[in-house]
Image (cartoon, rainbow, N blue to C red):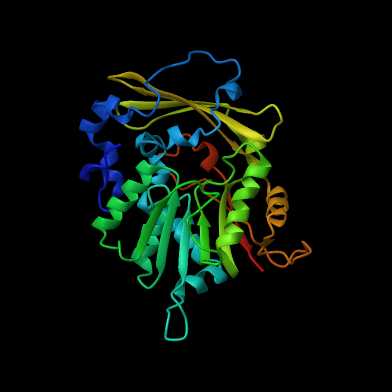
Amino acid sequence: MPPPTNNQAQNFVNPVTFLTDKDMLSSSASLVPDTLPKAVCHGRVQDPETMVQKAWWKSVFGDNLYLQTDGDVVEDPAITLEEIRLLEGYQVVHSILQTVPNNDTEKPRILDLCCGQGRHILQLAELYPHLELHGHDQSEYLVRLAQSRAEKAEVTERVHFTIGDCRSTPHPDNTFSLLLVMGNSFGYFASDNANTDLLKEIRRILKPGGIAVLDLADGAFLRENFSPRGWEWIDDTMIVCRERQLSKDGRRLVSREVVISTGKGVIRDQFYQECLYDLNEIDQLVREAGLVNYGKDKDGEEASVSGNTLGKDMSKRGEDLGMMEQRNFVLITKQ
């Protein structure tokens, strides 16, 4: 797969500009690399759950179509900055970000796990030049784009990216003071055991006393309030139509996304799913992984509030937010 072009790697402070490039959108076939399924429409599907591939994220995040269909949130720098400000609202997070190393202290290391195109880690690089920042994601395409943006922002000496499974990162034990899992990136695996494996990897690479922040879809809300169908115009030439249903066990939200170009017809028909966890269920997984909810003591008793909802009013397009409609921040720590 070729690296992103300059047009695809606009300066981070205004990354959304390339999404409305009419030349790009008029050649929709170029959005589908040879390694991904060719454009196809499956027609009426009686059971979308059976259509979800085991590693669906490899194709969904394999090119820049995701940055268009979800660009109203994931490519809006104002939203990224607002999410960082929300993180800063937690005193323990703010304290880590503000730590300036001296002769007696080492530089704080921050990891954005499942970093995508690097929007959060690059924003942190702009705000906190004293930090050592890392991003890790399974998508080679998105990581290459993140690297291109880091080069344009001239922060490559402070920002480092790696590619691979989020359950097995290349970092040593006890490396990071702060670890972020943003944008509903937790819960992609179909089983609790696989999602717990991700938490165990977080425990391995987090320093004792370090903080991890999980930005999660609000499972309790979505089980009762998800939209079975939705559609939105991405721009003047592209529309995305979505269908959603709960899995048979009621624990996952299964989604279908059909992307249509006015000039090319259907360019993508894809299926994906995400586990829906409420705060109590997340707390259970956290404890099984050997971590502790920062808002609770080791016995599970409440010590402080650690979750709050966000996201509903962030998108300027505001048409079909899906999993991004209501989210929770959950802070966890390694004792």
- Which quarter of the rendered picture does the C terminus lie within? bottom right
Q: Residue furthest top?
A: 43
Q: Residue furthest bottom?
A: 103
Front position in the image: 32 or 282:
32
- Residue 48's place in the image compared with 176, above or below, is above
Residue at image coords 28%, 51%: 148
Residue at image coords 39%, 28%: 36
Q: Is residue 61 visible?
A: yes
- Residue 301's place in the image compared with 264, above or below, is below
* Horizontal relation, residue 169 to residue 33: left or right: right
Q: Position of residue 91 (x, y in %)?
A: 56, 71
- Which quarter of the rendered picture does the N terminus lie within? top left
* Horizontal relation, residue 308 to residue 231: left or right: right
Q: Position of residue 227 (x, y in %)?
A: 57, 30
- Residue 214's place in the image compared with 248, above or below, is below
* Horizontal relation, residue 239 to residue 49: left or right: left
Residue at image coords 42%, 60%: 134
Q: Is residue 316 visible?
A: no
Q: Position of residue 215 (x, y in %)?
A: 55, 52
Picture quadrant where residue 132 is located = bottom left
Q: How many marks?
A: 0
Q: Position of residue 203 (x, y in %)?
A: 61, 60
